[in-house]
Image (cartoon, helix red, strand yellow):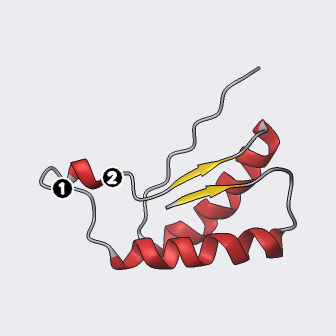
Amino acid sequence: MLLALRRLVPAKTLLALLLPMLSYISWLSPISGENEAEGPYAVVLAPTRELAQQIGKETVKLSHYLGIKLVSIVGGK
C-alpha cells in the first residue's frame, strides 16, 4: 500500500487516511524470516520533513495499540 501526501494536513484528515491502512495491515500476518520478502506492507511518502514527522507521530499513536512496527526515515538537515 502506498500513500503520498503533498502538504501538512489536519489531524482528522490524516486519521482518515491512516486508519484504513492500519486496519488492513492489522489483518496481515506479521513479517518474519519466512515471509520477509512480502514486506514492507506500506510506504508513506511525504515531501517535507515536517509532514513526515507529523505522519510518524500520529501513526505511532495508532500503531502502538495494533502491535504494528513503524519505522520513520527522513532526510535533510
Q: Residue furthest top?
A: 77
Q: CA distance from mark 2 to mark 1?
A: 8 Å
Quick one: 36 or 58, which is closer to the camera?
36
Quarter that holds the C terminus: top right
**Residue 45 locus on image (x, y percent):** 64, 47
- Where is residue 46, by image quadrant? top right
At x 61%, y 77%, the residue is: 19
Quick one: 63 or 40, which is closer to the camera?
40
Q: Which mark is residue 49?
A: none
Q: Are marks 2 and 1 in contact (CB under 8 Å)?
A: yes
**Residue 51 locus on image (x, y percent):** 78, 48
Q: In the picture shown, does residue 47 fall above or below 34?
A: above
Q: In the picture shown, does residue 61 fall above or below 2?
A: below
Q: Indicate left or right for 70 with 12 as reference.
A: left
At x 82%, y 69%, the residue is: 11
The three-letter code of the residue at mark 2 reads Gly
The three-letter code of the residue at mark 1 reads Asn
Q: In the picture shown, does residue 45 fall above or below 32?
A: above
Q: Which residue has dot 2 on it? A: 39
Q: Which residue has dot 1 on it? A: 35
**Residue 63 locus on image (x, y percent):** 52, 67
| Label 2, residues with CA under 10 Å away: few <14, some 14-19, many ≥20 | few
